[in-house]
Amino acid sequence: MSQKEKIKKEAFVAPKGMRDIMDEKYYHYQGFFEKAQEVAVYYGFRPLETPILENEEVFTSSIGVGTDIVDKEMYTLKTKGGDHLAMRPEFTAGVMRAYIENGMQSLPQPVPLYSYGQIYRHDKPQRGRYREVRQFNLEMLGSEKSICDAMVIKTACTILEEAGATNIVVDINSIGDKECRGGYIKELVNYYKKHMNDLPPVDRERLKTNPLRILDSKEEKTKAINEGAPDATSSLCPSCKKHFKEVLEYLEEMEIPFRINKNLVRGLSYYTRTVFEIIEEGAGEDGAPLTIAAGGRYDYLAKFLGSKKDIPAMGMAMGVDRIVESPWYKKLSPRIMKKPKMYFIQLGNDAKLKSLNVIEMLRKAHVPIMQSLSKDSLGQQLAIAERMGVPYAIIFGQKEALENSVIVRDMQTRSQDTVKMDKLLEYLKKI
Ligand code: ATP
Ligand code: MG
């Protein structure tokens, strides 16, 4: 192929379901992550960053077959060395892998951890549904106590409220443990067998691979059948019943609004006992409820990842893209972001030569500025300052470069002061 033929006719675009995030939007994300971390840290959570890639089996063995994530949404690759890796489709399995690998069992339990960043799912892109998703994630590993469940839910609700949510409700359910879940699944299978003829093919398949998942089905026909399905809470064994009751008592005590949702099972196989979703009423399409966070307890996950002992744990993830796009989002900005009050203008060669030194002096003094050093004319630079709505301009021309001074111009009144360079910071403090 000749060089000419190699030139692509159309410009590349980002992969489907993935976006570039910049300007204001970028800061909205950073502002949220900063706030979420701050709340998490005050509740005692500690940071953990895991690789975006994990061995594929970390997810296939834990999340399980018959789930959306493992069956159709995972991005997987084979490395040049022959390893089978997956882009993380969620945080929990990787966090548990890290807990085991780093011997966190020997720390005081439970170990509360937070993580955030991108996850990847080959989902069907639409409003509020992407293929590269940003989540903020909380896990509390090493305890089966109900207060851990309550604490994860409370921390998540607090983060959402601090970010501007006013109308959240927690949908909650318990799907039992190995004592009682088997009995419940049997009951469920019997129920679905009676409705076999009305079940869509995907759900008929799930009846064989992962019957609990049918309760989470997005098929309209199945949703109707699910209305009459037996509920998990009535088959709970005494210890699961007690655990669930305690979780609800904590929520009541903290005045967190909740609803018991008997069809809530969550799409992953590793859940036991508590499962929940946090919903913002009226925030979805046409005022429909929008799920912004979800999680649950996963007491048996660790053994799937090679742990000899069970490591009971509880966690949740929130969809940051959905939060940042919500009308209620407070548009938090990160602490490093200061809106520049100064526009730096330079004129002539001598001034341009010294201009980076002036900017460095201002930076050291933490005076955020805007500039367009590549421009030469005063008119152009003043026009940009005006367009950006910056209240003051610092003008550094030939004469000023020679006399080691600058002109400070009030963009509104157009009044100007000449200020000696060594008095500039003092002068700026006053205005
Ligand atoms: P759904 O049933 O809608 O596919 P899910 O059960 O796959 O949701 P979780 O795995 O619980 O979702 O993820 C937690 C949160 O992450 C969700 O409540 C949502 O806010 C967000 N989320 C999940 N998938 C996406 C996506 N494709 N695009 C944007 N946000 C997402
Ligand atoms: Mg999904």
Image: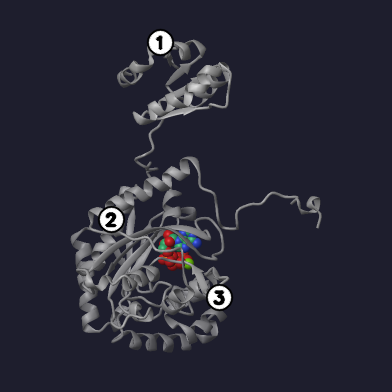
Location of mark 1 (residue): 418
Ligand 1, seen in the image, is in the quarter at bottom left
**Residue type highlighted by circle 1:** Thr
Label 1 near label 2: C-beta < 8 Å?
no
Q: Which residue is mark 2?
A: 40
In-image side of 330 versus 384 (left or right): left
Give left or right: position of 106 versus 95: left
- Circle 3 Cα neighbour tier, 10 Å, few/some/many (<14 / 14–19 / ≥20): few
- For the residue marked with disc 2, what is the amino acid? Ala
Nearest-to-viewer mark from 1 and 3: 3
Where is mark 3, residue-wise?
82
Q: CA distance from mark 1 to mark 3?
A: 67 Å
Q: Are marks 1 and 3 in contact (CB under 8 Å)?
A: no
Q: Position of residue 29 (x, y in %)?
A: 42, 48
Question: In what element is the residue under mark 3?
Answer: loop
Residue at 21%, 81% in the rendered image: 239
Task: First in sequence, mark 1 or 3: give its number.
Answer: 3
